[in-house]
Amino acid sequence: MNIILVQDVDRLGKSGEKVRVKDGYGRNFLIPQGWAIPATRGAGNQALAQAAARVRAVQLKKGKASELAQQLSGVTCAIEVSLGAQGKLHGAVTADDIAQALGRQGIAVDKHQIDLKKPLTVLGDTQVLVRLHPGVKASIRVSLVSK
């Protein structure tokens, strides 16, 4: 069966390529997943149009991520934490806490975009990397202060 890939498929080909696969693999997996379309006369143009639309969507997302990275540059996120009797934090500050604090400042960032190797457990300032898009990163300062 000849198909045209609508998106990149590992070990098979890139988007827009015409490839030959076994009938069952194409009919039962690739086409229902939306990864390929049957290779007919008009299918090549359709695949190219879909690929171009995907490229535009990725560029739009990258542009929005770049704008957000500029907005995040120089942002300090202050988080108030409670301390125990010996001056140690109760618990720790996680990526979710940082995302909520940024949300209160009007900046929408998903907790999964915050690159925090381990939760913060010490008072003071820490630089934290935010991965907004592949190739677009921003660094914010997280300041832990006692209540």
Image (tube, helix red, strand yellow):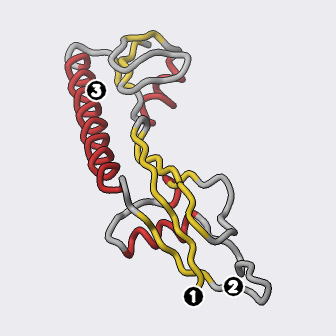
Q: Which residue is mark 2?
A: 83
C-alpha distance separating marks 2 and 3: 54 Å
> Disc 1 vs disc 2: Cβ atoms closer than 8 Å?
yes
Q: Does residue 38 sit above or below 35 in this rendering?
A: above
- Residue in the image at 32% along x and 15% along y: 39
Q: Does residue 91 sit above or below 12 in this rendering?
A: below
- Residue in the image at 35% along x and 72% along y: 105
- Kindly state the secondary structure of the residue where label 1 is placed: loop
Q: Which residue is mark 1?
A: 147
Pick the residue in front: 43 or 79: 79
Numbered label attached to residue 51: 3
Answer with the quarter of the image where residue 120 lies.
bottom right
Q: Amino acid at mark 3?
A: Ala
Q: Position of residue 98 (x, y in %)?
A: 51, 67
Q: Does residue 104 sit above or below 4 in this rendering?
A: below
Q: Position of residue 62 (x, y in %)?
A: 31, 40
Pick the residue in front: 7 or 133: 133
Q: Position of residue 30 (x, y in %)?
A: 47, 28
C-alpha distance separating marks 1 and 3: 52 Å
Residue 52 falls left or right of residue 85: left
Counting every numbered tag in the picture gives 3
Pick the residue in front: 124 or 2: 124
C-alpha distance separating marks 1 and 2: 8 Å
Q: In which quadrant will I find the C terminus?
A: bottom right
